Image (spheres, rainbow, N blue to C red):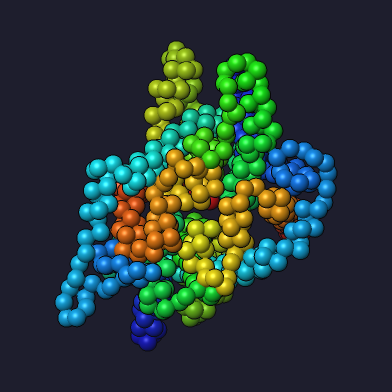
Amino acid sequence: MKKNVLKTRWGKWWVIGAPYLWLMLMLMIPFLYLLSVSISEMVQGGGYLPIYRDGGWFFKDNYTPILDDVIKGGTYRSAYLSSIYYAGVTALLCLLIGYPFAYFMARAPQEKQPTLLLFVMLPFWVSMLIRVYAIKVLFNDSGIIATTLSGSLKAMGLITEDLHLMNNSFSLLFGMVYVYIPFMILPLYSTLSKIDVRYWEAAADLGSTPLKTFFLVTVPLSKAGIIAGMLLVFIPCVGEYVIPQLLGGADTLMIGRVLAGEYFQNNDWPLASALAISIIVLVVVPMMFLNKYQDAAQGEIK
Amino acid sequence: MKNFKWFSRSWMTLVYLFLYLPIIVLVIFSFNEGRPTRWNGFTLDNYADLFQNQQVIDGLFASLRVAAITAVLSVVIGTLIAFVLVRYRGFVGKTLFSGMANTPLVMPEVVLGLSLLIVFKDLFHVEGGAYWTIVLGHTLLGAAYASVVIKARLSELSLTYEEAALDLGARPLQVFFLVTLPMIAQSLMSAALLVFTISFDDVVIAEFLKGPGVQTLPNVIMNYSRQGTKPVVVALGAMIVFVVSFVLISGSIWMQKREKRRQAEIAAAFRDAT
């Protein structure tokens, strides 16, 4: 009997140890590596000089140039600002479109709700890259939508030049809202569907108009869902790389693209690492908020 | 009230239209002659081109291979992570563990990709061309998603079955494989399916970790997308839509049938009992 207890105790450390080791190797060590590369000197053509060499420590400050640029207003500043701006606007648009949708879904007949939810999730199973590509097809400059819109607006005398729907902030925002709106709808739906109907009935009984009930009862009760949804959209959008690459233009440079450029085109590992650290810093506060509110919203993504 | 209904109906219809219109347009234009801008007439040429495109076929097989290995690895590691999170309260470094378990879900993929790339290149001198770099990167992401799915199932399981098995003299490993595993089998399946989809779909990590020798399907699409809209890619996209719809529809029909059969069996069992 005693032996068995010992065995299970050892077993416990194996069971905990194996995934612990995995996360340490794949997440912690790469992160520490990133940190150390971000303060070392670059080597032309890729690579870096280690910070400990020739019996001494050699640090290089790669953050000051970034900070300088941010203060003086160069490429990095505009990349950071537009990352935050587009992620924020995307989150807001998702909320504006998704909140009424989630609300109506939560108030739809009970037996219809699983189907309605299923059809929100369905596009997720089709490759995101393909869906982004589909938007490229949809808004092509010589496509139906662009040409008809251009033609009719010209006929009405509102514009004189051809309308461009692609590779600008419009197509970028459209794509980001399109891809990320399910991440907004799900936590909203899960909080809204849990609101007791009696709250609405009570509000109506006490003489509240539907609109008043909505803003004074429903919205405050779904606060956790709103915050979780906004963050679930905002956080991945800040570092988004694919959508700006495919749908964005020259004026929609985002930080993810800048980072990839520093690494792949300039072969500047330390600067790319410093940018990666700055992205972590940028999203770490929203992430902490997310952890706090996600449990409250019970917003299981998938 | 009537106004409300009208408004809610049209709002929901518009959102669904928004979600599905691009996909529908993509499928329609996959049958179009020439560039996918205006309708020139029906053709299947794009699909013929697709099946002869060696880059696409190589990419497809690379993606399938990576996604399959990733799914298996992720479910194994994800099960362990979920098990630790649900079953072990209070061990040294628990906060760090649960923090790390959640990080891949929210951390921007460029950061994950870059950090792994630097480690692989610097510690292992990988110059690319290997599947395993992409597989490892995808497994980091996949295990995190798998653990979320499996955790949900594990935490609703009652401990009594496992305790009963232990009381009856089963060894812990036996309990896990003969009692726990069958009970969470369905969540393992859905986790594997989810991870397969994520891996098959992922561009960013694959862009960072791919070598010159190995390109997944998303890498191929990314390369093509730098050259405007290509009929081949549109056909490929439509093909993916077809396959996914087929799998989802047949899957749900199969599930429904199984559920019906189960219900029938339960009913039969009740009949026999009374």
Q: Quadrant of residue B102?
A: bottom left
Q: Residue at x 52, y 63 (%)?
A: B206
Q: Nearer the viewer, residue A41 or B24?
A: A41
Q: Check the image and name the residue furthest to the top.
A: A207
Q: Position of residue A159 (x, y in %)?
A: 57, 21
Q: Nearer the viewer, residue A98 or B125?
A: B125
Q: Check the image and name the residue furthest to the bottom.
A: A3
Q: Quadrant of residue A219?
A: top left
Q: Nearer the viewer, residue A218 or A250?
A: A250
Q: Is residue B173 left or right of residue B57?
A: left
Q: Position of residue A177 (x, y in %)?
A: 52, 39
Q: Residue at x 23, y 72 (%)?
A: A51
Q: How many marks?
A: 0
Q: Position of residue A267 (x, y in %)?
A: 39, 64
Note whether B69 is above or below A208 in the view shown. below
Q: Is residue A202 left or right of residue A24?
A: right
Is residue A71 at least partly visible in the picture?
Answer: yes
Q: Is residue B101 left or right of residue A278?
A: right
- Considering the image in quadrants, where does the N terminus of chain A appear? bottom left
Q: Residue at x 60, y 33 (%)?
A: B15
Is residue B147 at least partly visible in the picture?
Answer: no
Q: Position of residue A256 (x, y in %)?
A: 42, 52
Q: Nearer the viewer, residue A267 or A36?
A: A267
Q: Residue at x 48, y 30 (%)?
A: A96
Q: Quadrant of residue B223?
A: bottom right
